[in-house]
Image (cartoon, rainbow, N blue to C red):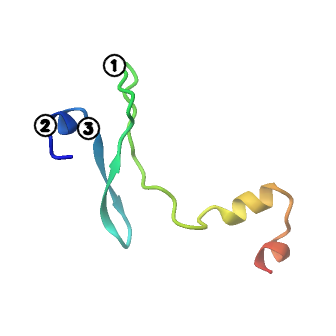
């Protein structure tokens, strides 16, 4: 992972995560000239979207809390 080509192609990207610090994540493998893309945010924490997903499936707040 310390090869010049890895750095040049931005195969690894650094993302700051609150409470953890800096993470090195794999970037996008496809490199497109006009729409290069990239990683701007860290991955979600465990259960970060649980309430939102369960609510969208019809569960009530009481059901989710139980």
Name which quarter of the figure residue 31 lies in: top left
Number of numbered discs overlaid on the protein picture: 3
Helix, strand or loop for disc 3: loop
According to the image, label 2 marks what residue?
A: 4
Which of the two discs, 3 and 2, labels the residue nearer the N terminus? 2
Residue sitting at 15 percent across and 40 percent down?
Answer: 3
Residue at 37% across / 18% down in the picture?
34
Residue 33 pos. (x, y %): 33, 19
**Would residue 54 be found to the left or right of residue 10 on screen?**
right
Residue, x 47% and y 56% (percent of image)?
A: 43
Name the disc covering residue 60, or none.
none
Which is more N-terminal, label 1 or label 2? 2
Q: CA distance from mark 3 to mark 2?
A: 10 Å
Q: CA distance from mark 3 to mark 1?
A: 14 Å
Q: Position of residue 51 (x, y in %)?
A: 71, 65
Q: Which mark is residue 10?
A: 3
Give the mark nearest the N terminus, 3 or 1.
3
Mark sitting on residue 33? 1
- Residue at disc 1, secondary structure: loop
Residue furthest top in the image: 34
Q: Which residue shows up at 84% across the image and 76% down it?
A: 62
Q: Nearer the viewer, mark 3 or mark 1?
A: 3
Relative to 28, say whether 41 is above or below.
below
Closer to the camera: disc 2 or disc 1?
2
Mark 1 neighbour density, 10 Å: few (under 14) some (14–19) many (20 or more): few
The answer to whether residue 66 is left or right of residue 29 is: right
Asked whether the residues under the numbered discs 2 and 1 touch, taking CB atoms below 8 Å apart as contact, a structural biologist would say no
Quarter of the view holding residue 5: top left
Real-space Cα distance between discs 2 and 1?
20 Å
């Amino acid at each position: 992972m310390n090869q010049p080509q890895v750095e040049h192609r931005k195969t690894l990207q650094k993302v700051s995560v609150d409470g953890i610090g800096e993470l090195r994540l794999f970037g996008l493998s496809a490199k497109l000239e006009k729409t290069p893309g990239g990683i701007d945010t860290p991955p979600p924490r465990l259960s970060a979207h649980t309430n939102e997903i369960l609510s969208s499936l019809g569960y009530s707040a009481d059901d989710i809390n139980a």
